[in-house]
Amino acid sequence: MDTRSCRSAVLAALLFGLVAPSAAQSIVVLGSGEDARRCSQAAEIAATVRIASDDDLKHCDLALELAALRPRDRAGTLVNRGILQSVLGDNRAAVADYDRALALRPELPEAYVGRGNVRFIERDIPGAIAEYDRALALGTSRRHVVLLNRGMALEAKADLDAAERDYRAALELSPGWPPAQSRLDRVLARRKAVTPPPP
C-alpha cells in the first residue's frame, strides 16, 4: 500500500467510530471483465473496512475506459470507484462518480448512500439525511446499513428520538448487529444523562 493509501486508511480508522458513517454500499459487477470485477471486489472491501489503494482505482479506470460495460455495470463501476475515491480522501471525485452513475441509473440507491456518506463526512448533516432518505425510498438492499447511517446523522443533529428509532429499526432487520446496538446504547445513555431524576 502506498503512502497516500496508508495515511487515508489510518485517518479513516480514527474517524470510523467517531464521525464517519457506517459503510458505503458497493455494487457487484461480475460479467464485464476482470478489471470491473477487481474494482467491485476492492470497493466491497473499502466499503467494509475503509481501506483502498491507488492500484484499486486503476482497475476501475481501466474498466470504465476500455471495457464494453452495459449501462447497469457502468453505473455500478462508477459507484464502486466513488467508494474508493472517498476512502482515499477525494470526496469531490467520489461525488462526481456518484453523479455520473445517477445520470445513467437515477434509481440506483447505492449512489445516494455514497453521496450521503460524503455529505456526512463533510458535516452537511441535512444533506446526508436527504440522501439516505432517497436511498431508503428506492428500496436499498442493505436497509439496515442506511438506517444506521441516517441514525448517526440524526444523532449528530441531536435528534435523539429519531436516531433511536433508526437504530431500533436497523436492529429489527439485523438482530444483535453490534454497530447498531452500540449506537442505540449510546443514545439511551445520553438521554439518561440529561433526564432529571424523578422527584
Image (cartoon, rainbow, N blue to C red):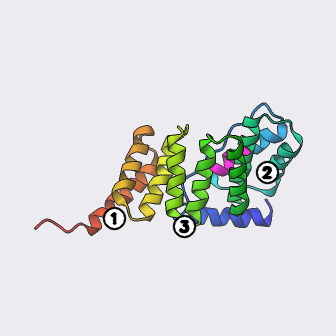
Q: Is residue 117 magenta?
A: no
Residue 106 image point, x, y percent: 64, 42
**Of residues 114 and 55, which is closer to you in this image?**
114
Q: Quadrant of the rendered structure where residue 85 is? A: bottom right
Is residue 48 visible to the viewer in this orientation of the structure? no
Please tell me which residue lies in front, 51 or 58: 58
User: In the rendered view, does 29 fall on the left or right side of 176?
Assistant: right
- How much space separates mark 1 and mark 2, taking CA atoms? 40 Å
93 shown above or below 46: below
Report the residue marked by disc 1: 190
Label 1 residue SS: helix
According to the picture, the residue beneath numbered tag 3 turns out to be: 123
**Which label belongs to residue 56?**
2
The CA span between labels 3 and 1 is 21 Å
**Magenta segment boundaries in residue numbering:** 40-47
Q: What residue do we see at 82% from left, 53% from top? A: 55
Report whether residue 112 is seen: yes
Query: How far apart are the two marked residues, 2 and 3, measured between alpha carbons?
Result: 27 Å
Kind of element beneath mark 3: loop
- For mark 3, does the 10 Å Cα neighbourhood hold few (<14), some (14 to 19), or many (20 or more) residues? some
Of circles 2 and 3, the one toward us is 3
**Quarter the C terminus occupies:** bottom left
Based on the picture, tell me whether residue 42 belongs to the magenta stretch: yes
User: Residue at 54% of width from left, 67% of height from top?
Assistant: 123
Q: Is residue 101 above or below residue 16?
A: above
- Looking at marks 2 and 3 on the same chain, the residue that comes earlier in the sequence is marked by 2
Between discs 3 and 1, the one toward the N terminus:
3
Amino acid tagged 3: Arg
- Label 2, secondary structure: give it: helix
